Amino acid sequence: MGDPWEAYTSLNSFKGNIYAPIIYMYTKLIVKNAIQVLYVTERKLQNRYPNKGVNNVNASNVNIEVTIDREIRKEFTEKENYKIGLIGFLSGYKGIDIAIKALHNLNKSKTHKYFLSILGTGDKEKYYRLAEKFEVMDYIEIKTLPAGDPVINWLDTLDIYIQPSKTEGLPRGLIEAMSRALPAIGTNAGGIPELIEDKYIINKGDFKKLSYLIEKTLSNKKIYNTTSAKNFEKAKEYDNSILKNKRYEFYKKLKEGDINE
């Protein structure tokens, strides 16, 4: 799951701030009293919603097959135009407004142009209006694709992936991008810092640093290739065969009653 505390406080609303501590305490109590817990993160949700079960595991709900038997290389190539990708439901939670502001900053460049491609369902017009306001309408597309190969093929057209979320559990889109050896930048929301290096983590809402890191990564061959390789190696930990085995053992022990002993 995601983090209800983070979700409601990120709404920037009076009602959200009132409800956040209530749902936080309620969730904490449920998790504390659970027989055993399957978390999607390695540390973040465990620290905020602890449970003392000895059979607790972390297994993301991502469903990808990382090509472990061969390396996927995403080599740096100097271009005039760069393509940035983002996957997420078109809501305030995913930080799409932050991505659009960063895109505006990036396209002040006189030497390169940056395009933002978003996969997601929801209110497209809201974000097209925002793109128009920030004068990047010609540099953005929002579309949907069927799961599976179409998404993988789309990821392979990108130069870099971003996850500017305001709240998260462990984002599947980011792991999928890493499994295609894409450099990535994300916020300090949820389990994102468990996936990518600290130097590619930004504070929620910091579009200036987001644009700076995108430009820096896409202008340095060594940084680009090193990050690409590290992300691919990290994504191997989330291969479906590994997570499937974790889930199987989790439910097997639950069924057998081998719990908390």
Image: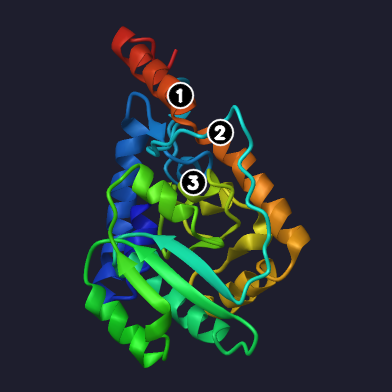
- Residue position for label 2: 237
In the displayed structure, would residue 38 be above or below residue 232?
above
Q: Residue at x 34, y 42 (%)?
A: 148
Q: Position of residue 78 (x, y in %)?
A: 68, 69
The image position of residue 67, as x and y in percent, is 54, 33
Placement of the N terminus among the 4 image quadrants: top left
Q: Earlier in the sequence, mark 2 or mark 3?
A: 3
Q: Secondary structure at mark 1?
A: helix
* Mark closer to the chain start, 1 or 3: 3
Distance from Cα at disc 1 to Cα at disc 2? 10 Å
Residue neighbourhood size for the residue with mark 3, other residues' Cα within 10 Å, grouped as few (<14), some (14–19), many (≥20) = many
121 vs 28, left or right, is: left
Mark 2, secondary structure of its residue: helix
Q: Which residue lies under the disc numbered 1?
A: 241
What's the residue type where badge 1 is placed?
Ser
91 relative position to 101: left or right? left
Given residues 42 and 115, the one toward you in this image is 115
Q: Please provide percent x and percent y for residue 244.
A: 41, 24
- Residue closer to the observer: 156 or 195: 156
| Count of marks overlaid on the render | 3
**108 versus 177 height, above or below:** below
**Amino acid on which disc 2 is placed:** Glu
The CA span between labels 1 and 3 is 15 Å
Residue 219 lies, with reference to residue 244, above or below; the image says: below
Residue nearest the viewer, comparing 146 with 62 = 146
Q: Which disc is residue 175 wearing?
A: 3
* Spatial separation of the CA atoms under disc 2 and disc 3: 10 Å
Query: Mark 3: which amino acid?
Result: Ile
**Residue 38: numbered disc:** none
Q: x and y percent of residue 10 in the render?
A: 37, 68
- Whether residue 51 appears in this view of the structure is yes
